[in-house]
Every structure is written in C-alpha cells, then in structure tokens.
Image (tube, rainbow, N blue to C red):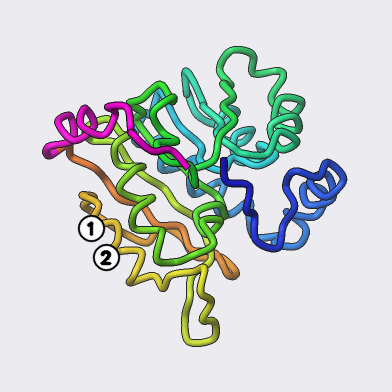
C-alpha cells in the first residue's frame, strides 16, 4: 500500500486532529463549496454518493443533512480521519458507509460497491502529489459512476500566481476530464484558492471497460 502523503502525516492522530480543528478556519470559504455541492446533488436527486478523500466528514455532514441521500460512502486512507467521521456522522446511522483505502493503490476502486450516482471530492485529488497522475485517477473515478452520474471536484488549481507540480490548471483539469470520458464540464463555484468543477458521465462504453479493468491484476503495488 502507498502511504505517501506529501507534507502531511495523516497517519498521526495528533496531526489529523489538529488539521481537522483548523481546516475550516484556515479556509473560511470552504462552507461555500459545501453548499454548492449540496445544491448540485439536490438537483441530481443523487441517492448513492461516494466521497473520495472524505477527511473528517465535514462535507459528508452537510450533504447528509441537506440532501435525500440513501447512502453516502466515505473513502479515505487515514484511519484517524475515518474515526473523526464516524463520530461526526453517528446520528445519520446506516446512511453513512465507511471505506478505508488509498487511490494511489493499483485497483483501489475494485472493492467499492459501484456504481454511484455522484462522486464528490473536497481538497483531495491533489493528494496524488503529481499533477501528471490526475488524468489516470479521473479515468478510474469514471468507472465508478452510473450512466448520467456527476463528478464534483473542489480543489486548488495552478494559475498565474501559482505553479505547483502536484496541481493542474483549470484548463488541464477540464482536458483530463474530457479525455477520461466526461462531458458537460463546467465551473460551479470559485472561493478563495478553491475551484469546484462538475462533469457528467453518459456511459459510452463504460460497462465493457469496467468489466475488463475489474479482472484480477497480475501485479499490485
């Protein structure tokens, strides 16, 4: 299993608790993105949602409170983040479903109960730590979506003032999503240094490719 987390140590309980305690004060505009995601999911009437890199469950809490979601699946590689999520979402009972795993691992998505009506991610896609790996991740995420499903990605992007190796520009995200098979790509909301992008998958050839990729691999990292 890959455990590389860049400058963060999400396997350290004290670090995770500190991160969670300041995340929304460090970026006080994050709730704007939460509300924008809730609005998108409400229009879609998404019943089954996957949160990729779900962290301490801030987004999950807002979606479960504001949307008629039957099951909200939280996927994160940090056991301490999932522990915080379980505590935060206790009142939502069986609607909150937890999965520990890393999207850096080969075939990481195979164990998840796809398909989903929607995939959401809040400040997690860049944790591949190399911008060049993001297009591959988008291709894997597409395989988890139901036909007509939507992907909602909120993250930092490179622009004229910022050029980081682990990030992509907004146009590069759009190109990567197109090449992964998504359509109707649009910017939903921008707040602070975060941009929320939406895209839809209409299912062209998805079932065949999903079946092919789900066969056991001869190599796992």
- Over which residues does the magenta segment extend? 204-221
Q: Callout 2: 10 Å neighbours few (<14), some, many (20+)?
A: some
Q: Which mark is residue 130?
A: none
For the residues labelled 2 and 1, the Cα–Cα distance comes to 5 Å
Whole-percent x and y of residue 122? 55, 50
Whole-percent x and y of residue 195? 48, 63
Residue 218 among those drawn in magenta: yes
User: Are dots 2 and 1 in contact, CB under 8 Å?
Assistant: yes
Which picture quadrant has residue 88?
top right
Q: 54 above or below 8?
A: above
Local secondary structure at mark 1: helix
Q: Residue at x 23, y 32 (%)?
A: 210
Which picture quadrant has residue 149?
top left
Local secondary structure at mark 2: helix
Q: 29 above or below 36?
A: below
Disc 2 target residue: 175
Q: Which mark is residue 178?
A: 1
């Amino acid at each position: 299993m890959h455990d590389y987390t860049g400058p963060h140590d999400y396997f350290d309980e004290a670090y995770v608790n500190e991160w969670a305690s300041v995340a929304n004060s460090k970026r006080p505009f994050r709730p704007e993105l939460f509300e924008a995601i809730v609005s998108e999911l409400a229009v879609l009437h998404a019943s089954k949602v996957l949160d990729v890199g779900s962290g301490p469950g801030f987004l999950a809490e807002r979606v479960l409170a504001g949307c008629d979601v039957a099951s909200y699946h939280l996927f994160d590689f940090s056991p301490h983040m999932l522990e915080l999520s379980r505590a935060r979402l206790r009142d939502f009972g069986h609607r909150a479903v937890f999965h520990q795993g890393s999207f850096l691992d080969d075939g990481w998505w195979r164990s998840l109960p796809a398909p989903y009506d929607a995939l959401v991610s809040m400040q997690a896609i860049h944790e591949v730590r190399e911008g060049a790996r993001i297009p591959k991740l988008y291709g894997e995420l597409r395989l988890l979506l139901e036909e007509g499903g939507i992907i909602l990605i909120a993250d930092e992007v490179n622009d004229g003032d910022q050029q980081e190796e682990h990030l992509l520009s907004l146009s590069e995200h759009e190109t990567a999503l197109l090449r992964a098979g998504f359509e109707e790509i649009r910017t939903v909301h921008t707040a602070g240094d975060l941009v929320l992008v939406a895209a839809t998958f209409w299912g062209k050839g998805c079932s065949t490719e999903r079946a092919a990729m789900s066969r056991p691999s001869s190599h796992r990292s």
